[in-house]
Amino acid sequence: MTQLSYLYTAAAFVVAGILAFATTPLAKKFAFLVGAVDEPRGRHAHEKPTALMGGLAIFFGFVASLLIFGSMDRQMTSILLGTLVIIVVSAFDDIYDLPAWLRLIVQILAALIPVFYGGIRIDVLSTFGIGANPDVVLSEVVSIPVTIIWIVGITNAVNWIDGLDGLAAGVSGISAVSLLVISCILGNAYVAIVMAALAGAIIGFLPYNLNPAKIFMGDTGAMFLGFVLATMSIQGLFKFYVVVSFLVPFFVIGIPLLDMLIAIIRRVSHGQSPMASDREHMHYKLIDMGFNQKQTVAILYCISGIFGIVAIILAAGGEIKAILLLLAILVAAVFGVSMIAARERRQEQPDAAPENRENTQSTEMKTDEAPSEHHENT
């Protein structure tokens, strides 16, 4: 990348952020005007009616910045046309709550635009060094459905983790920054500018979306972010003929993908539709473990950031370093889960010594705090 490319990338980031930040209050007013409001109910974590359609501000900041600093070739045009389809139908979904099957059909139709009009396809899959050829070149008959499944899958994956204030936007922002860094390392100015515009627009929106959220991005934002990340990961990552390239996009979009795969396996094993909604996503599991919203989002931000670092190391050719980092993370994760499980077991155990019960009761009488879990279970 040239110095001019870096300048354009930085400018795209700043302009997108400013525009998204400035237009989010307008998106909020528009959402209340058209009735795109999320009422607190069921598995939703918020406590008061909150405006949806914050994704319109992200979309505006992204597109405006891209039109100024990006390269509007046939491929980029096809991506923007696909996002326009996603945005329009998602806006109606935020207002009228469209059925899942209709959203799926629209996502497939939107994916067909970059696949056929823009020629954006996954042409190569890695065998990770197994066999005579490390990479398998896909025929058009295989490449097209694989690409559509990838785009639709990531679009839904980001939408499914949009359950807590700032979660989906922040995780998507980390993915966008990871793709931005990888693009700079690989010298791909085209993808770098697009990712800078996307990351900037997300960061400009986030101050309104962090807990307690003043506005949600809704399906308008979640599906838009998923669609752009899916298509640009093909442009920036799947096009490189190296063994590790197949792993990089999976780490870049690690949290949404992992949550989606677990959800599909769980629902299918229980005889449910893969598109059925529930309160079993990883962010709700962390809430159930005792973490509050801010802590849960921070934990998932950290994990997403670690995945992004692993992807960057892999893209830079540091396979051994990436493997060592993953092993260290795995050990730390096992230790952390063990500590949490041990704490829960201790909390569930009854008081062991009768002579300590009097002291415990007197302590409880002196405090105005909520009763402990043990007290609630007795």
Image (tube, rainbow, N blue to C red):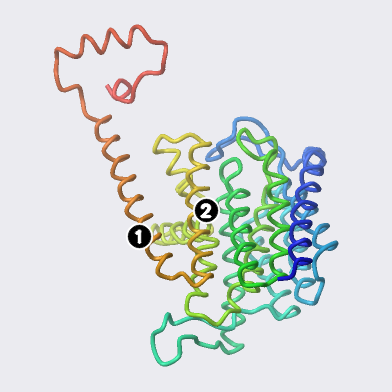
Residue 356 position within the rendered picture, expressed as x and y whole percent measured from the top left: 18, 14
Q: Quadrant of the C terminus?
A: top left
Of the numbered discs in the image, which one, if any, rests on residue 349?
Answer: none
- The residue at the point 56 percent across, 59 percent down is 157
139 on left or right of 261: right
Whether residue 336 is situated above or below residue 345 in the rendered picture: below
Residue 351 position within the rendered picture, expressed as x and y whole percent measured from the top left: 19, 22
Which residue is the extreme one toward the front? 3
Front in this rendered view, residue 320 or 215: 320
- The residue at the point 66 percent across, 65 percent down is 107
The alpha-carbon separation of the residues under discs 1 and 2 comes to 16 Å
Residue 148 position within the rendered picture, expressed as x and y whole percent measured from the top left: 61, 74
- Please identify the quarter of the rendering in which residue 54 is found: top right
Whether residue 297 is situated above or below residue 268 in the rendered picture: above
Report the amino acid beneath label 2. Answer: Gly
276 on left or right of 103: left
Crowding near the residue tagged with mark 2, few <14, some 14–19, many ≥20 C-alpha atoms within 10 Å: many
- The residue at the point 48 percent across, 81 percent down is 126
Where disc 1 sits, the SS reads helix
Residue 133 position within the rendered picture, expressed as x and y whole percent measured from the top left: 45, 90
Circle 2 sits on which residue?
305
Crowding near the residue tagged with mark 1, few <14, some 14–19, many ≥20 C-alpha atoms within 10 Å: few
Front in this rendered view, residue 309 or 334: 309
Of the numbered discs in the image, which one, if any, rests on residue 327?
Answer: 1
Q: How many marks?
A: 2
Front in this rendered view, residue 162 or 319: 319
Q: Earlier in the sequence, mark 1 or mark 2?
A: 2
93 on left or right of 366: right
Report the amino acid beneath label 1. Answer: Leu
